[in-house]
Structures are given as C-alpha cells and as structure tokens.
Amino acid sequence: MGTSETTVSRDEPVALANATLALRLVSASLPHLAGLCHAVRVRASARYPVAAIGATGLMLVNPRVFAGAPLPDLAFVVAHELLHLALDTFGRGGGSDPHLVNVAHDYVINDILSVELGREVPFGGLIRHGARRESLEALVAELARGGDPGACWSVGRKKTRRRAKAPKSAITEQLERLGLLPPQPDGFASDADEPSATGDTLSAAEEAALEPHLGPKERSAVRDRVRREAVRSVSLKELRDHLDRHCGPGRGADAGATEALVEAVATAYRPPWQLAVQRWLDAVAPGPRSFARPSRRGADRADGVVLPGRTREGWALHVVLDTSGSMLNTLPHVLGLLAAFCEGAGVTRVHVLQCDAGVTADDWLDPAELAAYRVTGFGGSDMGPALDALAEDPEVSAVLVLTDGFIAHPAAEPPYAVLWGIVDGHPGFSPPYGTVVQVKT
C-alpha cells in the first residue's frame, strides 16, 4: 500500500466522524433539513475533491478534506449536498446536460447558504451573487453558451500536472524488447491520486457500483424515502420563512399561537401541490403499446388474440375541468401550470372534458395549447357526466379532476385512478375514492 493510500485509510474514520458532526450542526442551524440529515448515508471516497451526493441519499466525503477542515466549513458543504436533494437537482434537468444542471444549482445553493448561514462559500466553491433569485433554466442556458463552467469545489482538486519521466536507459529498452520488463509509457505520468470528478452529483450507475448490495427495487424504495424527506424540507422552509415574515424572529408563547404553529407544521408536512401533482402524473403514466408487456384488458377475449401492453414513454392525460362559475378566475393560471407538468411527465396529448352540469366541451390538445385554451360553461357543478363518460372508455387508466370541490360526483369509484385537484376551494372536500391535492394559486 502506497503512502497516499495509507493516509487516506487513516483519515477515513476521522472524516466520517466529522461528517456526522457536520450533519448534526446542519440539523441545528437549518432545522428544515434535519429529516434529510437522517436520511443520507455517508461514505468516504477520494474520487471527489470535497463531497458529492446521489439521488438515493448516498453522500461521499473526501477523507483528507473532512479529516482536517474546520467544522463550520464542513457543515456548509454537507448542507450544500443536502440542498441538491431538496431542490431536486436529479429530477429538474429534463433533457439538459446533467453537469450544467449540477453547476447551475451549485451557484443557486451556495448563494442560498451564504445568506442563510452568514458565511463565505468555503473550498473555492462556485459563487454567483443573487443566483438564488434566478431560475435554473436561465442559468443552464447561460452556462451552455459560456463553455466549461468548471468544478463545484476547487480546493481539494489538484491542478492537472504531469511528472516528467527520466529517459530510458539502453539496458531498460533491451529488457523491454525481450519481455523481461513491462513496457513503460514515454513522456509524462499523471498524478495518480488526483480526484477525477468535476461535479458533486453521483449518477445512478455510480451509486449502484458503490452499493451493489442494493437491488433496483431496494434502491427505488430508498430514493422514494429521500424524495419525501426532500419535499418535507422544502415545506418546512416555507413555513419558517412565513413565520419569520409575519411573527418576526421570536415566537409567541400563548396557547393560541402554539396551537396555530402545530397546525401549520402538520400542514407543512404535506407535499407542495406542484410536486404532488407531478408525482401522481409520474406514477400513473402509461406508455405506447409494446408486445413486451401484454395488455391485461384483452385477457377475456374469446379469440385468444394477445394485445400489446404499454411501455412508459409518451402518453395521453385525461382531464375533467370544472367550469362552474366559481372557477372563472383560477382556471387560466391552473391550465398554464398543467401544461408545464405535462411536459415534465412526458404527456404528448391532453384530453380535456369541460363540465358544469353536463359535458360542455370534449377536446384533444397538445400540452402547449393548454395555456391559451378557451373555457366555456360556468354553469352548475356536477362532475358526474364527465367521469361517467370516461368510465366507458377501457383505455382510460387515470383522470385528473380540476375543481374547487363544491361539486357533485359519482358515489361509486370509477375504473381508473382519480386525482382531485382542489383549486383554492373546499378545504374539507373528502371523496370516497381517489387522491386529493389542495392546489393553491
């Protein structure tokens, strides 16, 4: 074992202990990240200059850096990696270059933490003042135009340098020709223990290689748990900001304030409605037909013909739109947001049934057309006709109902999944089936 390997091995226990202390400090300083602090799994690795994180919560820390750096700096780094999970760096990139998405969020996260923690960005981290107010998409586009954005952390990364090798002697060359010595490359040798990664996010393949004991099913379950904690952390951050704005940095001590705070925390534990709708779309999304997955709907055919099933690529989303009078002012905003959701979930066509007391429109649209879609009706409030009409189509597997909740609906559960998007409406809406999400505009 070489000297550098011995040093890394000796540093690992200290580095892992310091990483644990850093997580505890983050829990105390940024309590909305406490759940993520408990969800991540920490390992030591010299591959990354300072630290890195994967979508399932696997965090790598550089042994040399974490064994010797000040604890407040390590807490900044750990919080940075956790915010990659909270801000969904792994899911928000779409078709963009993952490295550019990583770097764009590095700028945003470091700007957030420098303000939240009142500290300068350590370890030569990327700095862009005001990045926390910029959109990820705009930053990615700017980075794509500007060339290589560089590495997330520069301290801990050695500059590329090569060591000149001494010229070979005549005896060495003769021994190589005879096969008695392995051939040595001419020119230069690179520094062997230089960290090789430029970003600070792990790919799915890297995580799988580092934790081969986790199969695809277990890894998916771990990622789902981390996602829930990430959503919860965002909710708690919004709650804390709201209380700071309206109550100041102090907290009231009367019973009424305490009861209100408990209710607010319980509410904050529900995912933000945008994420909830997106997750539902991801969960129910079918795909185009493929004989690799036979259809279950044709199992009762007497002719024995096997129908193709669905793969998960482009698909159609069925939407029931409540066009009662109380929805007049909110529908344009919700339809614009729905267009963005459809793009992210791979929806290629949207089937919209407008309904007040009956079906007033039945249209097939491209997702981009939703933002300028013309809504008619604004009469009664009975979603039954639209839901019953969709129940007659055996291809319908999921329906999104956008309503304020002051409606009539079928008592019997339809033969498809239902998501009730309650738009600025009835807080006590509780149907006997389906999933309810409160949509705040």
Image (cartoon, helix red, strand yellow):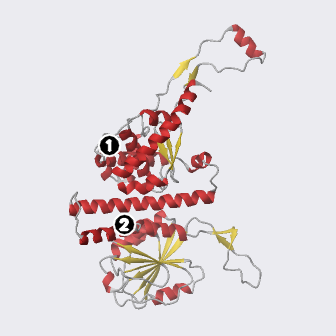
Q: Residue at x 29, y 78 (%)?
A: 329
**Number of dots carrying numbers:** 2
Q: Residue at x 28, y 47 (%)?
A: 115
* First in residue order: circle 2 vs circle 1: 1
Q: Amino acid at mark 1?
A: Arg
Q: Name the spot of residue 80 as percent of width and height, x first.
A: 40, 47
Q: Is residue 211 above or below residue 262?
A: above
- Camera sees residue 144: no
Residue 262 in the figure: left or right of residue 360: left
* Foreground pick, 281 / 39: 39
Q: CA distance from mark 2 to mark 1?
A: 30 Å
- Along the line of sight, the residue nearer the viewer: 257 or 49: 257
Percent position of residue 201, x then y:
49, 46
Can you name the residue that lies furthest to the top here? 170
Give percent across and percent down for residue 298.
Answer: 69, 80
Q: Which element carries disc 2, helix, strand or loop?
A: helix
Q: Residue at x 49, y 70 (%)?
A: 280
Give the numbered dot on residue 268: 2
> Where residue 31 sits in the image (x, y, percent)?
36, 55
Q: Is residue 42 left or right of residue 78?
A: right
Q: Nearer the viewer, residue 407 or 43?
A: 43
Element under disc 1 = loop
Compared to residue 367, the image places residue 127 above or below, namely: above
Residue under numbered circle 1: 128
Locate the C terminus by quadrant: bottom left
Nearest the eye: 248 or 184: 248
Within 10 angstroms of label 1, few (less than 14), some, or many (20 or more) residues? some
